[in-house]
Amino acid sequence: MELKDKVVIVTGSAKGLGKAIAEKCFAEGAKLALWDIAIDGVREVAVKLDKDGKRAKAYEVEITDEESVGKAMRDTVDDFGRVDVLVNNAGISQHKTIDQMTLEIFERVMKVNVTGTFLCSKAAAEVMKGQKYGKIVNISSLGARTGRPGVGVNYAASKAAVIGMTQTLARELGPSGIYVNCICPGPILTEQTRQYPPEVFATWNAGRAIIKDGLPEDVADAVVFLASERSAWVTGITLDVNGGILIRG
Ligand SMILES: NC(=O)c1ccc[n+]([C@@H]2O[C@H](COP(=O)([O-])OP(=O)(O)OC[C@H]3O[C@@H](n4cnc5c(N)ncnc54)[C@H](O)[C@@H]3O)[C@@H](O)[C@H]2O)c1
């Protein structure tokens, strides 16, 4: 029960990593505000976790829209009284090589991954400052740290921006008792990535030290650590969760 009674927002929690993060936080005793643009999906997750809706509620949020984020934050505070943890998980990718990458596709990915993370963090920081406590966990990507196959410049740039934002926010907000950390997952098996041919997934995993495939639960465990009191002297870090892909030599 590492997160007993902590109020945790997870963006993009209708499926994939966000859903696994929500489930793990719930198992650790958290009260959950499940944010997603896919309201039906996130409602399903909330009902499955807690059919009474006392410890898990779904909110329809477009994270690139300041008004939508502001409303969801107000509703979350109205429902749960505070916000202890924000997990900035919602993100998209749209892979193209540079010759195929249009300005529109570039900006779309930047908007969700960078502007969305910024808007949610800004809204959460306001609430957390009042509490003199809070934890923000950003989900970046291995794609920000290596030029890997299947990662477009839009996604790589957006996830590198999330690492930069993490460090700056950690410094800015640390004196207010707010921690800001970041996780860079390697290739994770989700409904979506399971649709790729196994050889493509294997290419992404080249050089990995641990043979086991990465699962959403592996990322969720790292989130619980950074959201809990176990990380009471950890801020501004980028935690690589990738089975050792980045080991050199
Ligand atoms: N799957 C991987 O292998 C992997 C690896 C590294 C990093 N990541 C990162 O982890 C995060 C989750 O990835 P995933 O594979 O679970 O993705 P996913 O596509 O399965 O789920 C993303 C969720 O975010 C929601 N979402 C998207 N845009 C939104 C918006 N504008 N407003 C609100 N909600 C929005 C979607 O509706 C969806 O429920 C992303 O930030 C992704 O970049 C994933």
Image (spheres, rainbow, N blue to C red):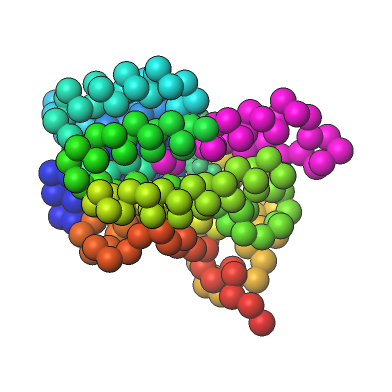
In this rendering, position of residue 65 left or right of residue 25: right
Which residue: 17% across, 34% down?
Answer: 82
Give the residues drawn in magenta, as a range.
Answer: 88-114
Return the residue nearer the eye: 166 or 202: 166
Magenta stretch encompasses residue 66: no
Magenta stretch encompasses residue 89: yes
Which residue: 59% across, 50% down?
Answer: 160
In this rendering, position of residue 220 left or right of residue 166: left
Which quadrant is the C terminus positioned in? Answer: bottom right
Which residue: 49% across, 25% down?
Answer: 64
* Residue 29 image position (x, y, % from top left): 16, 47
* Residue 5 image position (x, y, % from top left): 13, 44
* Residue 101 image position (x, y, % from top left): 79, 34
Q: Quadrant of residue 129?
A: top left
Which quadrant is the N terminus positioned in? Answer: bottom left
Q: Is residue 110 visible?
A: yes
Vertical relation: 218 (above or below) 18: below
Which residue: 65% across, 46% down?
Answer: 157
Q: Is residue 58 visible?
A: no
How many marks can you see?
A: 0
Vertical relation: 105 (above or below) 224: above
Question: Outermost residue toward the right?
Answer: 99
* Residue 18 image position (x, y, % from top left): 40, 41
